[in-house]
């Protein structure tokens, strides 16, 4: 945002991926120190801050402006485009939400790949595919953008390694006891069967699902299974995936889920990196044979497709396919006389 007198102006492009918003800011960002995206995320959080309680600073002021009402809402999500770690990637990104900064975001990766092609940042044919490589705080991810007649028809991203760290952990919540599985896939996800808490994955049960997700996350605070084995910046439960089985398809298993992340934020999409975590758990159970795919359905009935592509250093190579659509281009203003400043949350 400009420091010049008068209203500060922020330009952004909005997409949605399977219903989940993603607001992209690529210009006018304040300087963020760091040689890598992971270091820039740490700088954005600020010394003494946490991922969900960053210290106020110029970049965090911008995050609050774009994620809070009246310019955003409690379900808003987005990314600041920053330089990649090296010339092997096309761009880097700092993922943000209403509470702070995340280490991974599959739906955001899909939206960014669409944006990179739409803007010409990454050249792409009218018919065929192109790869967009993106440095995120948890590592480098790659997205294959499929094009037909000059339009993007689908995007498949390959995530950082996914691996399981715990099975059937006993957890007690006000909804009763349950068992939780923990897997890492760029962020740490706890998976629990919704039925074990007397819930179903429907929009009508969303208040209970959200509260249950928060309770499970709180119960696992500091648990050893939530620690990343090589990078402590990736430790701690980021999202809780409440899931239920659907009838298998001809291509493989199907599940419905809602992912509750950060401080009670709800993913409208089937959750991209959460889908990677589910793939690792299904593979551990022998429920996802080679050549089969997971049909992952969100609480609003949008779909991601997840596949196992094999093993890589540190875990399983997963691929998640979805679509993203541009919803708007914006010039947001912050009037210095506006008493609400960067906004509010309800």
Image: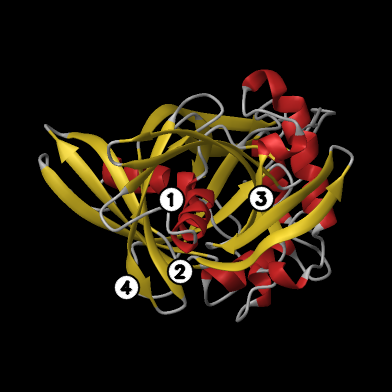
State the residue in front, 142 or 167: 167
Judged from the image, the secondary structure of the residue bearing numbered disc 1 is: helix
Quickly name the residue at label 3.
239
Quickly name the residue at label 1.
109
Q: Residue at x 62, y 78 (%)?
A: 231
Q: Residue at x 44, y 60 (%)?
A: 283
**Whether residue 154 is situated above or below residue 239 in the rendered picture:** above
Answer few, some or many: residues within 10 Å of disc 3's Cα (few below 14, many 20 plus, some between 14 and 19).
many
First in residue order: circle 1 vs circle 4: 4
State the residue in front, 45 or 210: 210
Residue extending furthest right?
Answer: 174
Label 2 – label 1 distance at C-alpha: 15 Å
Select label 1 or label 3 by which is in front: 3
Judged from the image, the secondary structure of the residue bearing numbered disc 3 is: strand
Task: Return the mark for residue 258.
Answer: none
Answer few, some or many: residues within 10 Å of disc 2's Cα (few below 14, many 20 plus, some between 14 and 19).
many
Quickly name the residue at label 4.
88
**Whether residue 236 is situated above or below residue 100 in the rendered picture:** below
Q: Is residue 99 left or right of residue 182?
A: right
Task: Return the mark for residue 161.
Answer: 2
First in residue order: circle 2 vs circle 1: 1
Q: Is residue 74 left or right of residue 277?
A: right
Select label 1 or label 4 by which is in front: 1
Label 1 – label 3 distance at C-alpha: 17 Å
Q: Are marks 4 and 2 in contact (CB under 8 Å)?
A: no
Label 3 – label 4 distance at C-alpha: 29 Å
């Amino acid at each position: 945002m400009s420091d010049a007198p008068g209203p500060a102006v922020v330009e952004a492009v909005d997409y949605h991926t399977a219903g989940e918003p993603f607001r992209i800011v690529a210009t006018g960002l304040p300087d963020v120190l760091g040689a890598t995206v992971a270091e820039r995320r740490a700088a954005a959080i600020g010394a003494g801050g946490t991922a969900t309680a960053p210290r106020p600073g110029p970049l965090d002021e911008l995050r609050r402006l774009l994620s809070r009402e009246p310019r955003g809402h409690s379900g808003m999500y987005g990314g600041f485009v920053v330089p990649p770690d090296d010339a092997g990637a096309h761009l880097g990104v700092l993922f943000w939400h209403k509470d702070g900064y995340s280490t991974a975001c599959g739906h955001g990766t899909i939206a960014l790949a669409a944006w990179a092609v739409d803007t010409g940042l990454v050249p792409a044919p009218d018919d065929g595919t192109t790869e967009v490589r993106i440095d995120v705080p948890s590592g480098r991810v790659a997205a294959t953008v499929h094009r037909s007649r000059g339009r993007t028809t689908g995007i498949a991203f390959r995530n950082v390694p996914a691996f399981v760290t715990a099975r059937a952990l006993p957890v007690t919540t006000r909804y009763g006891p349950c068992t939780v599985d923990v897997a890492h896939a760029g962020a740490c996800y706890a998976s629990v069967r919704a039925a074990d808490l007397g819930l179903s994955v429907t929009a009508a049960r969303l208040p209970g699902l959200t509260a249950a997700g928060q309770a499970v996350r709180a119960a696992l605070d500091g648990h050893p299974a939530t620690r990343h084995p090589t990078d402590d910046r990736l430790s701690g439960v980021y999202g809780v995936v409440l899931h239920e089985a659907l009838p298998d398809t001809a291509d493989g298993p199907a599940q419905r889920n809602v992912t509750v992340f950060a401080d009670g934020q709800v993913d409208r999409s089937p959750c991209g990196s959460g889908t990677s975590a589910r793939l690792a758990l299904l593979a551990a159970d022998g429920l996802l044979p080679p050549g089969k795919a997971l049909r992952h359905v969100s609480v609003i009935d949008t779909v991601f497709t997840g596949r196992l592509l094999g093993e890589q250093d540190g875990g399983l190579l997963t691929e998640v396919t979805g679509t993203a659509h541009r919803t708007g281009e914006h010039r947001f203003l912050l009037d210095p006389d506006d008493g609400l400043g960067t906004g509010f949350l309800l």
